[in-house]
Image (cartoon, grey):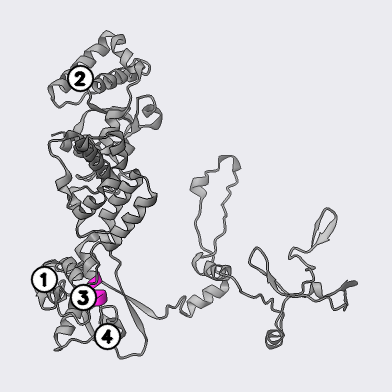
Amino acid sequence: MRKKDNVFSCKNGYPKQFTAQTTTNKDGYPCYKRSDIGEQVKVRNAELDNRWVVPYNPYLAELFDCHLNVEVCSTKKAVKYLYKYVYKGHDRVPFNISAEDRNSRDEIAQFQSRRWVSPCEAAWRIFGFDLFEMHPLVLPLSVHIPDMNTVCVRPYERLDIGIASGVYAKTQLTEFFRMNAATDNGLGYLYGEFPEHYNWDASAKTWSNRQNKNSMVGRLAFVAPSEGERFYLRLLLLNVRSPKSFTDLRTVQGYVCATFKEACLKAGILEEDDAASICLAEATEIQLPGALRRLFATVLIFCQPSNPAELWRKYYPALSEDFAQKYSGAESKIKKLTVRSVEQHLEAMGKSLCGCVLAVLMDNNDTEIDRTKDIQDALDAPIPQACIDSRSLLNPAQKEIFTCIMQHIVEGKPGAFFVDGPGGTGKTFLYNALYAEIRLMNKIVLPTATSGIAAANIPFGRTAHSRFKIPMDSDASLACSVSKQSSLATLIKEMALIIWDEASMANKQNLESSRPSVTRHMQ
C-alpha cells in the first residue's frame, strides 16, 4: 500500500473492477472476469470481496505449497518480455568510489565498470552448466566463386606449406562438389540440405556421415544482388541438386554457360528483368520523374538487370518528363540532363553508369555530364559580395601573398603556402579574397579548417575531417576513406585551391592522412 493525498492505495491497482468477462486492456494485460457474488471475507479488520483476489492456479499453489501469481500471455508483448531477459546482458548497477577529499574528485579516473554475479549464477557457472542452448543446430555454409574463398592463416602455420598441400583450397563448397562427384548420380541433396545428413570437420576440412541423431540445419551465407556472380551462384546452389563442380553448376541441358547469371536465366531460376520492369512500371504511375530516376539508379545497383539498356529505352520518356516539359524540343539537352541526374544518384551510392553497363549513355566530349554532384554543388555555390569586395581592400602584405598564390593557380603550378600571423591580422580576410577571386574564374576552392568555429568564418567552409574523410582515431588507421571512383575523389582532382585554416593546430597524423590522397589527385 502507498499513501497519496492522505489516501491509501495499492500500487498494483487493487481492488479491481467487477467485470462480466475476461478482456485485454490497452496495455496488453488481461482484465480477468470478476463476478459480484456478494461474498466477503474479513482480513485484518477489512472486508474484502472478489475484487481483491489475486489471480492464481489452485494446482500450482498446492503443488509448490506457495502462492504463485499467474498471468495469461495473450499478446506478442509477452514474447518481448521473455526475450528481454535473455538479451539484456548481465545485471549492472551504477556506483562510484569517493575519496576523503570530495572537493578534488576526478569522475573519469574513479569510473569503474564491474560485473556483479549473484550466488545462483555463480553456482551455475561453477558446475559448468550450459548458459544457453540452440535447437536445432545451424551450420553456416560458405558461398564463393572459384578460387575466391576466404583463407584463415593462424600465426603458427606456414603459408607456403599450406598452399603447396592444397589445404587452403578445400572449403565446404568444394568438398560438397567432391562428395557428389564420387557418386555416379550424386547424393541427391541441395547444398543447404547436406548438413542434415553429413557432418563437417573444420580441422580436417572433410564431410563425413552423420552418426548422431542430432539434427542440424544448413544456412547459406547471405549474398547481396550487387555482388554479381556470387549472388547467382547462391541461387543455383539453392535450386540445383547434386552439383559436381562449378562447371557442372553452369551446365544447363548439356550447354555450359559462360557465367552463373546466364545459367540462372537459362534454367528459369531468374526471370528476365520482369520484376525490375514491373517495379518501374508501377512507379511511373505515381512517382515524379526525380523520384523515378532515383529508383532507376537503385534498380541498376541492387537488382542487377540483365539488359539495363532495354530498361533505359523503355522508361526514358518517364525518366525525362520534367526536363522535356522545361526544355521542349531540345532533345540533346534533355538526354544530357537525364543522364547526369541518374549518374549523380549512382555516385551517391558509390557506382557509375559505366559500372552498370550503360557507358554508351556517357558523352566523353560533354563536360557537363562528367561533373559529379559535388563538383556541380561547388560550382553553383554563390559568392558572397563581401568576399568580392575584400579583393580591393587588401593591405600590401596581403596583396603580396594574394598575388603569389594566384600566379601559381593561373599558371597551373603546384605549391604549398603557409600564412602565419597573430590573431586579428587579416588571415581570414585574405582567405575570403582568394575564395572570391578563384570562384569568379569558375574554378573550385575547398575551404576547410581544423575546428568547426574557424570553418564557419570561411564561405561554405567545412572541417578537414569532414572534407577529406580523415579518420578520427589516427592510431587505428592513417588512410582517408576516399576511393578512386568516389565523387569526392573527382572533386579533389578538379579543385584549384585548398584552404586549411588553423592547420598548425591539427594533429600531425591528420596532415599525414590527407596529404597522400590530395597530392596524388593533384599530380
Instruction: Name the residue carrying label 2.
Output: 405
Q: Against 506, is 459 above or below?
A: above
Q: Which residues are magenta?
A: 235-239
Distance from Cα at disc 3 to Cα at disc 1 = 22 Å
Instruction: Name the residue carrying label 4.
Output: 198
Q: Quadrant of residue 368?
A: top left
Instruction: Give the mark, 1 or 2, whose residue is nearer the N terminus.
Output: 1
| Element on which disc 4 rests | strand
Instruction: Give the mark, 1 or 4, whose residue is nearer the N terminus.
Output: 1
Instruction: Name the residue carrying label 1.
Output: 161
Instruction: Give the amino acid type for the residue marked by disc 2 in the picture.
Output: Ile
Instruction: Give the mark, 2 or 4, whose residue is nearer the N terminus.
Output: 4
Instruction: Give the amino acid type for the residue marked by disc 3 in the picture.
Output: Leu
Dot 1 alpha-carbon crowd within 10 angstroms: few under 14, some 14 to 19, many 20 or more: few
| Element on which disc 3 rests | helix
Residue 258 appears in the rendering:
yes
Instruction: Give the mark, 4 or 3, whose residue is nearer the N terminus.
Output: 3
